[in-house]
Every structure is written in structure tokens, then in C-alpha cells.
Image (spheres, rainbow, N blue to C red):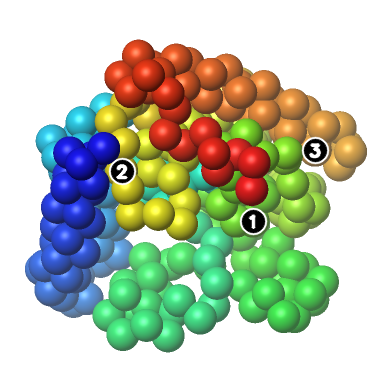
Amino acid sequence: MISIFLRSLVFNVLFYLSMAVWIIAALPTFAMPRAALVGTVKAWGRWNIWLMSVICGTRVKILGAGRIPKGPLIIASKHQSMWETFALFSLIDQPIFILKRELKWIPFFGWYLMKTGMIDIDRKAGMRSLKMLARTTKEQMHLGRQLVIFPEGTRRPVGAPPAYKSGVAMIYAGAEVPCVPVALNSGLCWPRRTFLRYPGTITVEFLDPLPPGLRRDEFMSRLTESIESATGRLVETGRREQARLFGHVPGAPEAGN
């Protein structure tokens, strides 16, 4: 555990220092087309994945990437960690994310979010904000972009009961595009609310797409079942791997929160 602590400390210092370097290096992209900044952000995501593998011994396995259709679609992902916010960006062709409006007020970082066309939401505006969000995401997707959304709205502990929100169903109903569910087990290696980063394998699995036009209740049922069953399988595999490494599973206590 001393080794994990020290490796985690080194990783986090380098993670935030390199973020500052990448932010400065990307300044010229403000005078370039949006694609230049998107490419830079993808490179930053790949850098972080490499950095974590070298320092923390955390490998990444991607399954089912061939299931992602071309063109506009919704990618609905399980959310256990900060890891998938940058990792998924680097895996998707033309990604857009939904984020808190307050993030756009952060100097430089917020300006980059606006330049890349990320969609902000005012969580205090309720249904009015959701309706506006559904219209905006539809417009963006029909320009050929792929919406990455976390249906539970926030990070959930590994093993916690699912808590899917209705917003994803509203967006799906209005967009009339396929939805690709995504399962993962990132919370075992990058748990929330701690700076510790554990060795192991983060597995991301793109599942069979859900076709457009499903009834809202059927869509939510199939989405939840698809993501949760696959996530459970990936988490169990990850737990067995970490048990071999440590004799126990470091992230397991969080599931009881």
C-alpha cells in the first residue's frame, strides 16, 4: 500500500501539472477550426491513459468498439470515475458532452469547452432546461456528432444500486438516433473521493446499440439492464484480478456507501 500511495501521489501531481501544460500548448487552437482543439483534447486523454499505465500499472481494455455505428448517435455510459470523462472523449469520433454550466466559467478550461461545442445545462432550471437540452443535442447530433451522456447524472460507487435519470430518455425520444450503452469498471482503479489509483485493468465495453423509436419505458428498461448486467460482469472480473494482486479488493468498501 505504501507503493500504491507513492505511485498515486506521483500520478496526481503529474496529471494536474501536465493538464496545465496541455492547456497552454492548446492556446493556438483558438485561431484554428474546432477539429484542431478536439484532436488536442483526444491526445491529452491518450496521454493520461498512458501516464496511468506507466506510473500506476493500470491497463485499459476496450471491448465492442466495432459496435459503434457511424454518424449521429447517443453513447450512454456507466459513470464510476473521473477517468471516463477524458478516456471516452479520446475513443469517440466527434464527441459532445453535457456538463454543468458553471464549468464554462473557469478561465481557459471553460473557454476550451465552449470552443469544442460542449453543451451546458442549468440544473436549477428543471424541465425547461431539459427541453432546451433535448433540442440542442438533437441539432448537434444531426450535424454528425456523437453525444456522450451519463444516464445516472453523477459518479456512482462500484456496486451501488442503479439510479438512472429520465433525461436520457427525453433526449433519445427527440433525437431519433441509435443509442449505444457502455459498461465499465473504472471505479475499481480510480475510485471517487480519493486520490489513490490502483493497479489492474479498466475495461470499457460498448454494447449492442438500441435502435431509435423504442417506447420510453422500453428504452429505459433495456438501457438499464444492458449496462448494469455488463458492468456487473466487468466489475466481478476486475475484483478477481485485484484480489490476485492484493489478496483483497481495494475499492470494495466504497460499494457500501
How crowded is the residue under tag 1: few (<14 C-alpha within 10 Å), some, or many (20+)?
some
Mark 1 vs 3: CB contact within 8 A: no
Q: Which quadrant of the structure image shows residue 221?
A: top right
Q: The residue tagged with tag 2: helix, strand or loop?
A: loop
How crowded is the residue under tag 2: few (<14 C-alpha within 10 Å), some, or many (20+)?
many
The image position of residue 141, as x and y in percent, is 56, 52
**Residue flagged by tag 2: what amino acid is it?**
Arg
Quadrant (top left/top right/bottom left/bottom right) for the N terminus: top left
The image position of residue 163, as x and y in percent, is 74, 46
Residue pointed to by mark 1: 153
Residue pointed to by mark 2: 197
Q: The residue tagged with tag 1: helix, strand or loop?
A: loop
Query: Earlier along the polypeptide chain: callout 1 or callout 3?
Result: 1
Q: The residue tagged with tag 3: helix, strand or loop?
A: helix
In the picture, measured across the screen, residue 221 lies left or right of residue 33, that is right
How crowded is the residue under tag 3: few (<14 C-alpha within 10 Å), some, or many (20+)?
some
Distance between mark 1 and mark 2 Cα atoms:
23 Å
In the picture, measured across the screen, residue 44 lies left or right of residue 216, that is left
**Residue flagged by tag 1: what amino acid is it?**
Gly
Distance between mark 1 and mark 3 Cα atoms:
14 Å
User: Can residue 109 be seen?
Assistant: yes
What's the residue at 64%, 56% (across, down)?
153
Mark number displayed over residue 220: 3
What's the residue at 61%, 23% (across, down)?
232
What's the residue at 54%, 39% (across, down)?
253
The image position of residue 50, as x and y in percent, is 17, 39
In the picture, measured across the screen, residue 152 lies left or right of residue 221, that is left
- The answer to which of 59 and 143 lies nearer the viewer is 59
The image position of residue 57, as x and y in percent, is 20, 31
User: Can residue 180 be seen?
Assistant: no
Query: Earlier along the polypeptide chain: callout 2 or callout 3?
Result: 2
Name the front one of labels 2 and 3.
2
